[in-house]
Amino acid sequence: MVLSRLRLIPVGLVSGTAAVELCEAGNALALAGGPLAFTHARVSGPGAPSEAAGGALLPAAALRCWAAASASEDEDGPAALIARVSAPRPNFAALPVSGAGARPRIMGVCNVTPDSFSDGGAHALPENAIVFARRMIAAGADIIDVGGESTRPGAAPVDPARELARVMPVVTGLVAEGVPVSIDTRRAEVMRAAIDAGVSLVNDVSALADDPDAMRVVAASDAAVILVHMRGQPADMQDGPRYDDVLGEVHDALAARIDACRTAGIAPDRIAVDPGFGFGKTLDHNLALLAGLAQFHGLGCSVAVGLSRKSFIGAMTGEDDPAARMPGSIAAALLAVSRGAQIVRVHDVAETRQALGIWRAAL
């Protein structure tokens, strides 16, 4: 089944007892199983209801009526779209991500590179990276994302053999200690070695598109995958990126990659999507994606975000030093989880965990 290109942007997000009461009264719909719900939505794309023309808001009751009147049981139409937006998400990479008892999951960034934009190669040596990863786990990280190739704007590709030499001592050391590990790579050879070593998650900024063997490697395993949207390559992705409709184009590109994964045998419950903040996007593109992030729940997968220390935060705040962008990074993470993001990839684990704890308690 190919995902339709109908798009639904939930708005009027509510939480706590208000969300429960509104859902029970038929005046709201759950967002990815809760704890958030939405009272209205904008609908666009082929088959959108006529009353949604011009971006008009539709209340939850009207969305239900549209779904009931428009879709048969065997088509991927309005009913299926609303079900995907609302349904609880299964555990992702063994982590509960949905429902009132779940919480946003923290992926701690561990760059084993000499040229990382965020930490300047501070953890390039395996022993330093392992110590740093232990500190992130102690501070509250749920999983450690190990990467051996910088994908900052302007970065050149790294040979897979060099990437393997950088990441595998860290991966094997952390797995041996029982630490949940993700591998941040575009290369099938690196994915295969990391999965064989016990890695449970592949985080690919090319959405399994750069290496022709990547899809087969993930499909043949039990590993989950984060499909990140990127336009272009790291070396050129920030050379004047243009979109007519960034929300719609990123949505449709990720839908196409989900379709490709399903065709290859990767089940939807093994997939999360990431709109790729900073990967071929301007400041305005990034802000539009953050504002409309709830739309990506219509793809039926968990939603991950990588906002931490990104250059658009520096552009907004005037802060040139990525390591000094922690306040903006936390604000962006809170905005993302307030739009239903289940996974946040961050550098400042302890600070983010504290902020998310306050956010969750206030629900």
Image (cartoon, grey):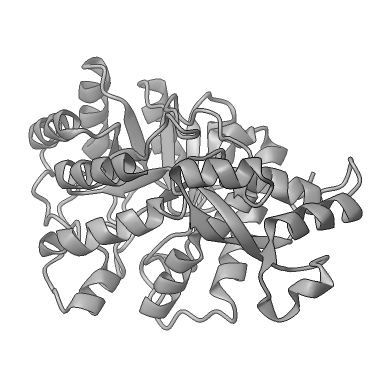
Residue 158 seen in the current view: yes
User: Residue 199 location, x and y as percent?
Assistant: 37, 26
- State the residue at coordinates (63%, 61%): 40
Q: Quadrant of residue 120?
A: bottom left
Q: Residue at (11%, 36%) from the top-left corner?
A: 132
Image quarter where the N terminus lies is: top right
Above or below, comparing residue 346 to residue 96 in the picture: below
Left or right: 211 as drawn, with respect to 134: right
Residue 227, given in percent of the width and then of the height, sits at 51, 48
The residue nearer to you, when weighing 126 against 278, is 278
Q: Quadrant of residue 154?
A: bottom left
Tell me the residue at 19%/76% (across/down): 317
Q: Nearer the viewer, residue 33 or 164?
A: 33
User: Which quadrant, please, contains the C terminus?
Assistant: top left
Q: Is residue 236 left or right of residue 98?
A: left
Q: Is residue 131 above or below residue 188?
A: above
Q: Nearer the viewer, residue 233 or 288?
A: 288
Rendered location of residue 92, percent (x, y): 48, 31
Count the numbered circles shown.
0
Rendered position, 211 above or below 50: above
Which residue is at 91% across, 46% downward?
72
Q: Position of residue 239 (x, y in %)?
A: 39, 80
| Residue 357 in which image quadrant | top left
Is residue 237 among the parts visible in the rendering?
Answer: no
- Please give left or right for residue 51 compared with residue 325 in the image: right
